[in-house]
Image (tube, helix red, strand yellow):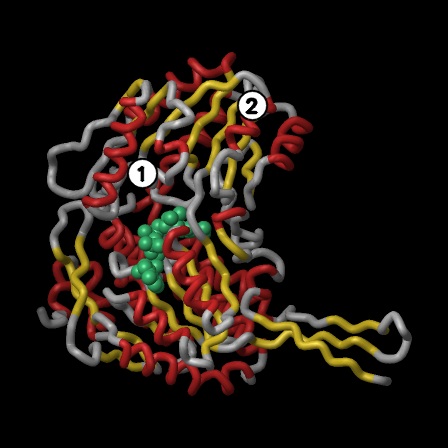
Amino acid sequence: MNISPELFDQDSDLSDYTAFSHGLYIGGKWRPSSDGRVIEVADPSTGAVIAAVPDATLADAATAVEAAAGAATSWRETPPRRRSEILRRCFELMTERAETLAVLISLENGKALRDARGEVAYAAEFFRWNAEEAVRITGEFGLAPSGANRIVVDYQPIGICVLITPWNFPAAMATRKIAPALAAGCTVILKPASETPLTAYALAALYEEAGVPPGVINVVTTSNPGPVTAAMLADARVRKLSFTGSTGVGRVLLAEAAKHVISCSMELGGNAPFIVFDDADLDAALDGAMIAKMRNAGEACTAANRFYVQAGIHDAFADGLRKRMAALKMGAGTDSETECGPMITRKAVGKIDRLVQDAVARGATILCGGEVPVEKGYFYPPTVLTDVPPDAAMAHEEIFGPVAPISRFEDEAEVIARANDTEYGLAAYIYTRDLAKGMRVASKIESGMIALNRGLMSDPAAPFGGVKQSGLGREGGQKHGITEFMEAKYIAVTI
Ligand code: NAD
């Protein structure tokens, strides 16, 4: 199959973006893969092929590293103020084009338009935040304890960065890496997920328009990510791997990076507990539960994966959640009425179905949903389960879909132990009117992020990341995000 810009013309609203269908984005140029092969992109609401993008080879990976290396010196020497202005322009252009980008995200990922709009705003915000951070990178200066010399610490760009992103937030997971890397003075090669490459290429065109020089951002898509990534990491000029995706692939990449002792940031899977105490505001907890569970139809690393509800409020919460979940409108993401879009692939639907069947076989009760619809497309209905036992597979694996498993608990110590009974430690949610209890429980939950009486915690101004097998390092936040792309250089000087 040849790359055909006409494939994009099926939706005239997106016709402005057909240019990016021409190729890999390397050194400021659009080019086909060296062997001319392509990857087909499907619309998850129908399964129909909507586009094709180049399928990069090892030779293309080498060309991308060459381009990033060629641009590295001039970019690191570009004054921070200028880098900041370019990043700010990226924010402005993303904001101006928000609706088109949101439709594109909905089309290739399937998420509801309202979620896609939220993602574009969140993704753009990384450019605004890092434009502000770019001019505030400071070092350290002090007297050595011996009094013999001064200690000067300078923060320098780490070098060429390989960035790998998942399909669930095609824009935000990329900008959460690109913006701090560029602010720090690094050049990058982005490898987006092959399920959702169109947003990455659309954004590449936008970065160029914003003034990002050729070679500073390169984008390559491949159906052969293991060898292509290994080839890039084997080039001694590559000094950073920043990955967002599953814990399984993260482990493989950590081993690959270890061969070359490359700095790694890992944003991996989650298994977030959502804890509701008896004294919680029921309506607020239900509002928060719907956001924590149903943003992106449950396809989020921070998605509430296990609901632990205290005995006194359990039945009211379960009934309230059932009513809200059952009322959601399922449909194509691009349909403005849709509240729950399709899953990314048929395989993803199969996994969710397996987890639900397993829970039922172990004694769980379905309050709503629980059956794969017969329509075309990769749909799974909003589903609520109660009496989900601790040995159900879904208590330990990411569901990554619109399924809310509820379990009852009696006291604080029990729920903390159950919440921590997982290899993951990304996010957790707590609802209680007792702030002291909320803070006490928050301090004992093993996760990198806690939302206390809130259904959402993601914020470019706050450090995002996990503990345990949910990852290494942080993205966003004051200094955290940029520091991942910098090295401290210590200079001992006698003054
Ligand atoms: P995935 O791990 O299958 O793929 C992620 C990326 O890695 C894709 O670009 C994929 O092509 C690439 N990849 C796959 N195998 C590779 C290999 N051997 N070498 C190099 N690259 C490889 O994950 P996914 O299904 O795309 O995304 C869902 C996962 O991402 C979930 O586990 C979710 O929790 C996680 N996630 C985490 C965060 C976070 O911030 N912690 C955010 C979003 C998603």
Q: Is residue 236 left or right of residue 107?
A: right
Categorize mark 2 by other alpha carbons within 10 Å: few (<14), some (14-19), many (20+).
few
Quadrant into which the N terminus falls? bottom left
Residue at screen point 42% across, 87% down = 70
Residue 474 position within the rendered picture, expressed as x and y whole percent measured from the top left: 55, 56
Residue 170 visible in rendering = no
Of callouts 1 and 2, which one flags the residue occurring earlier in the amino acid sequence? 1
Task: Quickly name the residue at label 2.
Answer: 414
Residue 88 position within the rendered picture, expressed as x and y whole percent measured from the top left: 49, 68
Dot 1 amino acid type: Gly
Q: Element under label 2?
A: helix
Q: Element under label 1?
A: loop
Residue 293 position within the rendered picture, expressed as x and y whole percent measured from the top left: 39, 35
Q: Say above or below: 365 vs 488.
A: above
Dot 2 amino acid type: Glu
Residue at screen point 21% across, 39% down = 350
* Residue 401 numbered mark, or none: 1
Q: Say above or below: 296 vs 413.
A: below
Residue at screen point 44% across, 51% down = 268
Residue at screen point 21% across, 70% down = 55
Between 94 and 447, the one nearer to me in the picture: 447
Residue 285 position within the rendered picture, expressed as x and y whole percent measured from the top left: 49, 26
Quadrant into which the C terminus falls? bottom right
How far apart marks 1 and 2 lie (CA) works out to 26 Å
Between 31 and 14, the one nearer to me in the picture: 31
